[in-house]
Amino acid sequence: MIFVELPAGYIDAVATASGVGLYVVNTVPEEDSVDAPVDTTITVELFSTSAETVDPLKTEVWIDGTLAYEGNGSPKFKPGFDGPASAETVLGGHDLRVVVDPTTDFDSETEVEVNVTSLTSGSTYSVDYTYTFTTEDVINPQLVSCKALFADIVRFTFSEAMQASSATGTNDALNPANYSFEFVPEHDRQAGVSVTAVTVEQHSATEFDVTTDIVLTFWKTYRGVCGDIADDSSNANLLVTTARTATFSSWVPPDWPPRRRFDLWNQLSDEDRRTDVHGDLERLTSVRQDLTDLMLWDSDRTVYWWDPDRAPEPYVDAMLAEMGNPFRFDLSLNRKRKLIAVLPDVYKQKGTGEGLINVVRFFLGIEITEITEFNVEAWKLGYDKLGYSTVLGPGDDKALYTFLVIVERVLTDEERLQLEKIIEYMKPAHTHYRIVEPGDPEFVDHWRLGYSELGKNTLLHEAP
């Protein structure tokens, strides 16, 4: 037995024409395609389903509003579209293929419009067809700027949307390894801390916020440096090698007292400064100045430690602990700040249905549609009568003091557990509860003495 390997072929797409007439059946690049090469040729094929042939002399191709091919013109291919691959081919003596080879490349990421008009040989059928395609992105991105947003946060802004994450992560804008910082001293007697990128968060398609391991030295100049970061195009173009750095001024506390004077170098004696020939003392003093500025900044911020809306999270946690926060839920910092504001009202509403509804809405965002009353009502002296205002209820104490919490939707296991914890804290101590969700068995309404009648107000149900 002899095995022979034969060449194989496949068809990307087939354009079909229905009825009798003149049609554009094939285009290269395809209609609505993206990432077409900027140096692409444009091919259109015209197909006649009638006995009349496609007439090349009555065919024109326009590209972005400019006549590129004129079948009866001289020359047929106009300047700018007469590249070596431009050709007119009659297919089988009946149909027509036109290839336009532009002499200049298209712009990067631009939409190209192609318009084809033609008639059959007898002018019986015509076509006027327009389609578009988009070219590939061949422009490499650039680092536009760096800006310090906080003491240890720097925003990198790029000229176009960047690749945030990928399978390898090597060229990702969210990879901290692709960022570094250089201290740029004003003179050789100035010192500043060296920092390292530890995390990156995406602010927008072109903006990424880099957090450093320590605070940058105040009032100093730094240079942000990017590695091989790619844009989000299919070509994954890397940053231009000559546009990967940007200088910026380090962050300064906005509430720094304008009249503060705490310059350690100027506090030294004139003799110490005069004899510092090599600048070693000034460099050492600048290091100490950095530490001093940080301590002054920490001291200034103590005023915010007692403000729930501005305090750091550890201080917010301490405030909640001092208020006796009974809820041990995992909350964001903003939710903790809001809890501090509403916790006094929660204490006031403890033991009430209104309080339970409000707390559940605050923590879970779930609406309680109804909280039923207890199954027992005390008689009112001089008003209630036996057989008239009497409710026949259960005999055991637990059922007697049980209420129902009816919620608007089916809960998840985690939501149900959290709801139970909230109810346990908010309900009166001697009561019991049951959570009712949509789809739960219907609640059994017991007979009422002097009102309910057998066969009329009777509901047959399973015994508990």
Image (cartoon, rainbow, N blue to C red):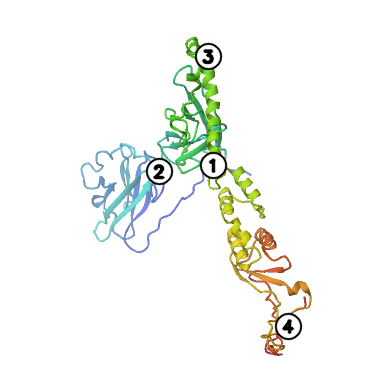
Dot 1 or dot 4, earlier in sequence: 1
Q: Is residue 376 above or below residue 75?
A: below
Label 1 and label 3: CA atoms lie apart by 38 Å
Number of marks = 4
Q: Position of residue 124 (x, y in %)?
A: 25, 61
> Circle 1 sits on which residue?
304
Dot 3 or dot 2, earlier in sequence: 2
Label 1 and label 4: CA atoms lie apart by 60 Å
Label 3 and label 2: CA atoms lie apart by 61 Å
Q: Secondary structure at mark 3?
A: helix
Q: Position of residue 234 (x, y in %)?
A: 47, 42
301 and 93: which one is in front?
Answer: 301
Q: Secondary structure at mark 1?
A: helix
> Circle 2 sits on which residue?
36
50 relative position to 339: left or right: left
- Do the numbered discs 2 and 4 sit on residues whose CB atoms are within 8 Å? no
Q: Amino acid at mark 3?
A: Asp
Q: Position of residue 287 (x, y in %)?
A: 54, 22
> Circle 4 sits on which residue?
392
Task: Classify mark 2: residues with Cα within 10 Å, few (<14), some (14-19) or many (20+).
Answer: many
Q: Nearer the viewer, mark 3 or mark 2?
A: 3
449 relative position to 111: left or right: right
Q: Is residue 230 above or below residue 119?
A: above
Label 2 and label 4: CA atoms lie apart by 81 Å
454 relative position to 286: left or right: right
Q: Amino acid at mark 2?
A: Ala
Residue, far front: 382
Q: Which mark is residue 198?
A: none
- Do the numbered discs 3 and 2 sit on residues whose CB atoms are within 8 Å? no
Q: Is residue 169 above or below residue 54?
A: above
Label 1 and label 2: CA atoms lie apart by 57 Å
